[in-house]
Image (tube, grey):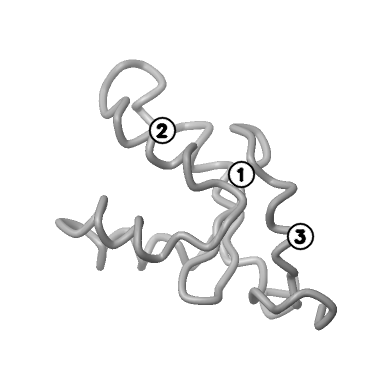
Amino acid sequence: PDRTRAISHEELAEHTARDDAWIALEGVVYDITPHLKNHPGWDGAGVSTVLAIMNVLGRECSEEFDEILSHHTAKVRAELKVYRIGRLVESGAA
């Protein structure tokens, strides 16, 4: 897949469900659907993390990401690379 394609804020905002989950961090868009579908929080372990993730789907969430995951951000950021699908651009630039 083209991991550098331009994705608008409007397109990003269309992906806010457990089975279609996109986020943007520092201008990079990720399709985290596989991660979210298999997150242990759905079975009770880490439910607050799942709720926090669901709350930021479909938008740029760098600040929230850093706040919520500050204790293991480096590990999570490394894992995110496989979910990269593009770069966030201003409306009309996509």
The picture places residue 66, in percent across and down from the top left corner, at: 28, 62
Mark 3 or mark 2, whichever is nearer to me = 3
| Quadrant placement of the N terminus | bottom right
Task: Give the structural element (helix, strand or loop) at label 3.
Answer: helix
> Which amino acid, mark 3?
Glu
Residue farthest top in this picture: 43
Residue at 71% x, 78% y is 90
Q: Which residue is mark 3?
A: 10
Whether residue 36 is situated above or below residue 68 in the rendered picture: above
Please report whichever mark, 3 or 1, sits nearer to the chain's N-terminal start. 3
Three-letter amino acid code at the position of disc 2: His
At x 69%, y 80%, the residue is: 4
Quadrant of the rendered structure where residue 92 is? bottom right
Please, which residue is most extreme toward the left here?
A: 71
- Disc 1 residue type (three-letter): Ala
Q: Is residue 78 left or right of residue 57?
A: left
Q: How many marks?
A: 3
What residue is drawn where x is 65% and y is 33%?
A: 19
Residue 72, which numbered label?
Answer: none
Residue 62 coordinates in the image, percent (x, y): 40, 65
Tell me how far mark 2 sits from mark 1, CA to CA. Answer: 13 Å
Residue at image mark 2: 39
Label located before the other in sequence (3 or 2): 3
Between disc 2 and disc 1, the foreground one is 1
Q: Which residue is mark 1?
A: 21
Q: Secondary structure at mark 1?
A: strand
